[in-house]
Image (spheres, coloured by chain):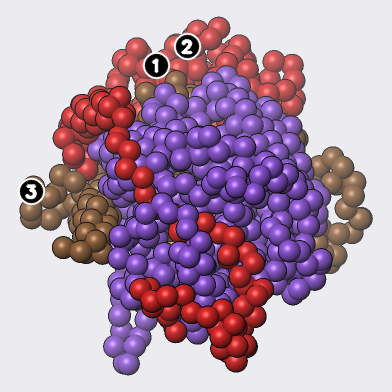
Chain colours: A purple, B red, C brown
Amino acid sequence: MTEVGRNGTDDKARYALERARIDASCRLPTLVWICSGVIWLLIGSTLALFASIKLHSPEWLFPDVSWLTFGRVRAAHLSSVALGWSFSMAIAVSIWQMCRLARCEMIYPKMLIVAAVIWNIGMVVGVVGILIGYGQSVEWLDMPPVVAPFLVTGLGIVAAWTVATFRNRREPHVYVTQWYLLGAMFWMPWLYVTAVLVIFGLDITLLGMNLRFSPATGVVQATTNWWFNHNVLGLWLTPVGVGTAYYLIPKVIGRPVYSYYLSVIGFWALALFYSWAGMHHLIGGPIPAWMASASIVGSMMMLIPVAAVALNHHMTMRGHFHHLRYSPTLRFVVFGAIAYTAVSVQGAFESLKSFSEIAHFTHYTVAHAHLGVYGFYAMIMFGATYYIVPRLTGREWASGRMIRWHFWLTAIGITLYFVSLSIGGWYQGLALIDANIPFIRIVRGTVPYLMSRSVAGILMTIGHVIFATLVVMNVCGFGRSRSGPTLFVEKRVTSVYEPAALSV
Amino acid sequence: MKPPLDQPLPDYEELERREEARDVDVQQLHAPVIREHNEPRDGLEPIPVWMGMAFGALLFWGGLYMASNAGDYRGDVLDRYEPKPVVYKAEVIPTDEAGLKKLGEKIYLNCVACHQSTGEGALNQFPPLNKSEWVVGEKASTARLARILLYGLGGEISVRGNKYNGAMPAWGSQLKDHQIAAVLTFIRGNWDNKAVPIFAKDIAAARTAVGARTSAMSVAELEALPIDQVDPGATPFKK
Amino acid sequence: MDRGMVIFLGALLTFTSSWLGLVLLPLLPANSTYPVLSALRVQYQEPFIEDQGGVVTSYPRPLSGSALRGKAIYQQNGCMYCHSQQIRPENFGNNADIKRGWATRRTVPRDYIYDKPIMLGTMRTGPDLANIGVRGYYADWHHKHLYDPRMMVPGSVMPRFRFLYEKRKIVGEPSIDAIELTGKWKADLEAGYEIVPTGDAKDLVAYLLSQDRTTVALPEARE
């Protein structure tokens, strides 16, 4: 069973040794996936800046180059950050946490590296393909279908590895993070294969046999597409993000998670309700009433798991919020967890008809999306990276000041992003439903808010460059070596016997 | 190599020697790892009662919502708030002035992009229809209006003292005769305009009179038609 | 039952519910023989055919030739990411979509049966294009607008698609395809040169002109 709360040094040392071995075995594959993620983050941020600037100033930045027009750059940006950065980080943190929680050393590390190579080949072909003019105009699945086999293989290897690791575990207790990660690894390949087959179909000749499969016509493509997109958010990114928060928050502050029962509700309600909410992207569109209604109910029911998780994390943190002053990991992760609650509550109400009437088709939705994938998911991934990498390389972060800059640039950036686009999008929506306002006036009205978004994007990108620099410095061994953890501010040691000491 | 759980801690120095043989820098790895707390564990606080009740209420709401807004789960019911099953109604073709005006108002939505919902158009771009001499004034006639709608209009035209040099597209293939008649009746009877209605047979007569034609009308051609000219088969002239 | 099996079965059952309900069931053809299941289906397959006094309307019609090639250009340039192609019903947003003149009725699933890929769009940075072919924008307007949107709509933020146009020296007579520039664009063009749309541009415009989704009054859209 879980170890009872003894703080005895014997146990600590023994488990520490075990963890050291696990980390040593995890080192190369996890670092490979983290580096893959960081590279895609830089690529995705650059494309994001292009897209954002082009939307309010289309005459800037090489307006006559076809692969830099907004339609293509936006699609390439989404693929780079959603499939490149987000997936790479999800896999990196998952494989490390699965090993840690299973308390066994990593099995088949080379397979994970092979998966990383295959995944990245697919990603490069896909993103370049979109830019040069092979985009599919299917949201989140823009990359030409030729990359699908690469992505399925890479993902499939990691999913199979996860199940094998779980079955190979030494720790009998299954901690809540493992439920989330197992769920995510089980659902994601199924989602992707279904979406690609239903939307793109299949037309290949294998061993002399011609396999053709093209089932979806008309709006069924759109409904399947949004079922897939929304579930990538909710049944892949959300479980990885929330599961990681469930691991890191209690880990850093040294307290147990508040309530096992809330964890149970949080996980199963997510699994049950989230997958029905996808159609809310098509409310008002040419879909049957029952699909739209099911999505609204699914979206509102999501308040249940979100409230459970929020209460759980809050009560776990209660009395320990002062640690946010010191620990980079904790600050990023708690920011992300709060953003998760905010974006989910917003999303639940955004699906209701009176809200959706105004917000649909506007930049408001874009702000909401970025609060989720960036404010929640990316921030938690930053926090997780700050925790994991020193344990793999054995080196502390080179500069607490740089981490501080990273945090504030990205936190202020995403806040500015969210606020400016939400306000701009809301006004845009109100104007769209007033037929007396000429359309071009609505477009001009959004421009100042789009410019604020570009400013926010610049802040965030600088933060990412700092982050990437820190990772490179740590992995390559540059920078000062330290004997203690890299914190935001130096912690004053008040007493050697300080209970529940912070451990970063 | 997994250390066994129930044996005493091995000798540290011995371990170091073994680890060095494996080329792992134990000292380095231990620094961040040793100061960690043990892996997280679950507390056993119960779910607060108020939260359980809130969840129950939300589930109840969800059930009610699905019951009233799912449109019997039919694939052909699209409206959410008043789900109606599909009833095939044949299109009613109006023949009276009121019916034509009502239909014309709907058809006119095809025209608002240029002529605007006020009928005032846009200066130098799209001519106004309101108080236009071509619609209800001294240059208006059923035959001329039918031709404009059926075949389009190009070249320079003067309306209410202003010149316009655009290209109005032809609607003869997209709209049926009664639809063209309806929208003409509408523009002639809406805003400040008041004139006799135009009927489907007038449009059909114009089609027959002109025959097949792929180029737009010009103002010169229209002005060549006398005001009182009536195509064979159309409504007799009435001012 | 060990914990791993609980997680597996739970994840399987919860996921299967939406997989069946939102993906597989709607895929089954609407006119199949199982009445219980037919209620859920969305996938229409037959177009609407109406014969009114000898005039046969068959709607929708699949694209072909230039318009079909143009659809690929539209798809590859990500036009969908600013332009939607769906009209919302009258009880949505003060009926604004219809009042703006974008269409005469809402769009229904049958309007899209030949759309592959379907590009409903989720952003209206630019106006809706479901019916752009019948809203009075003629081919020349589209060419000028694609060449530089700000020439036709001052203040537009749409990217310019000059790479779909060719600037070439006038040889003898100006070609009939050449587009007529205005204002400062005309001044910027050197004398003796003309702007001619490439095949891609013509295809794209043919596609745009073919967009007609609501002029046919379908039975399911009649109130």
Q: How far is disc 2 from disc 3 in space, using C-alphas? A: 50 Å
> Residue beneath label 1, please?
B101
| Towards the viewer: A350 or C7 | C7
Secondary structure of residue under mark 2: helix
Tag 3: residue type?
Answer: Pro
> Residue beneath label 3, please?
C35
Query: Residue C111, image x and y in percent?
Result: 35, 46
Q: Earlier in the sequence, mark 1 or mark 2?
A: 1
Question: Residue at point 42% right, 80% down?
Answer: B2
- Where is C194 relative to A298, above or below? below
| Towards the viewer: C207 or A483 | A483
Q: How many marks?
A: 3
Q: Chain of mark 1?
A: B
Q: Chain of mark 2?
A: B
Tag 2: residue type?
Answer: Gly
Query: Residue A194, image x and y in percent?
Result: 33, 64
On residue B189, which mark appears? Answer: 2
Q: Chain of mark 3?
A: C
Residues behind callouts 3 and 1 on a single chain? no
**CB contact under 8 Å: marks 1 and 2:** yes
